[in-house]
Amino acid sequence: MAEAEENIRFHAMFHIEGGNFMNGGAISSRVKKILKEAGFPGKIIRRTSIAAFEAEMNVICYANQGNLSLLITPSFLKVVIKDEGIGIPDVNLAMTEGYSTANEKIRELGFGAGMGLANIKKNTDEMILTSKLGQGTHLEFIIYLDGQNEG
Amino acid sequence: MTLKEIKDILSAEVISGDHDLEKEIKYGFAADLLSDVLALGRGSGVLTLLITGITHPQVIYASNIFDLGAIIFVRGKRPTEATLQLAIENQIPLLATPYIMFETCGRLYQHGLRPSIARIKNG
């Protein structure tokens, strides 16, 4: 998943505040706006924004703080989300649809159904998730710009 | 059908987007879980109405991602002030109906509105 430095056309980083539910989705909205202004096809924008939204909510729901980076290269979009927080004890289990450790507060907001990580995987071409218990989680995903995403 | 027709069918109040009542809506998607909106909203778009009881700002952010045509709040729910402001900013019309979700969907279906997604693939 390495990208040559000279091929990065755009790079932006956003801070995500853990527990700030009111603003949940604000960062992914900005990501969407950037991609729209850059003129990417609708499907690419949608897939990236959905995955970014889910990732952003994960930081808000489960971490103290984190940041989301968006990288645009000629051949792919890459989003990296790093957080400081409790981490994920069992990454494979967390990837299972329907598995969730969400509390009542998160569920009240209509999240925490255990669909987020699976939905990120579904909407992206590559996804890497690693976590250190008690330290934080590192998630990155790539969406290729190979012309199969028109529409 | 237009938003105006939806308003009439559901005795709905237009909370924002008064000037958008001629907007055409063909599809509906109903959910009280934002996770479901994010997971299943893929086929949606400008012709889609989101039918929901979620009134906090995330519903606008999520709708914005799919470029949804409008949102109708069911069970007499009202958006928070932050939600309303965000909807105005993003130009997403908001309606509110006293009907429950089941009745809302039933009435709209009866009048020709169709699901943006009818069933999931593997379930």
Image (tube, helix red, strand yellow):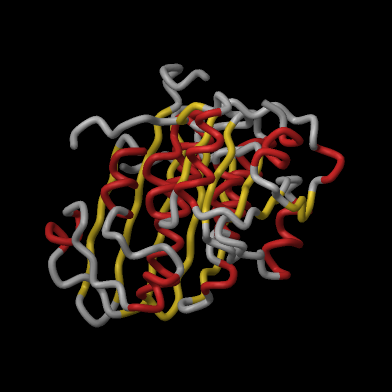
Residue at (71, 42) in percent of width and height: B7
- Which quadrant of the structure image shows residue A35? top right
Indicate left or right for A126 with B122 as reference.
Answer: right
Where B29 falls versus A80 (above or below)?
above
- The quarter in which the N terminus of chain A is drawn is top left
Residue at (36, 38) in percent of width and height: A123
Q: How many marks?
A: 0
Task: Where is residue A130? Give x, y as percent.
Answer: 23, 61
Where B109 falls versus A20 (above or below)?
above
Indicate left or right for B80 with A11 as reference.
Answer: right
Task: Where is residue A88? Give x, y as percent.
Answer: 21, 70
Task: Where is residue B106? Give x, y as percent.
Answer: 48, 38
Which residue of the protein is positioned furthest toward the right in this rendering?
A: B19
Between B102 and B3, the one nearer to me in the picture: B102
Where B13 falls versus A136 (above or below)?
above
Indicate left or right for B62 with B120 as reference.
Answer: right
Residue A109 visible in this rendered orientation of the protein: yes
Between A22 and A127, the one nearer to me in the picture: A22
- Which quadrant of the structure image shows residue A96? bottom left
- Which quadrant of the structure image shows residue A122? top left
Residue at (59, 39) in percent of width and height: B49
Where B2 falls versus B16 (above or below)?
above
Residue A13 visible in this rendered orientation of the protein: no
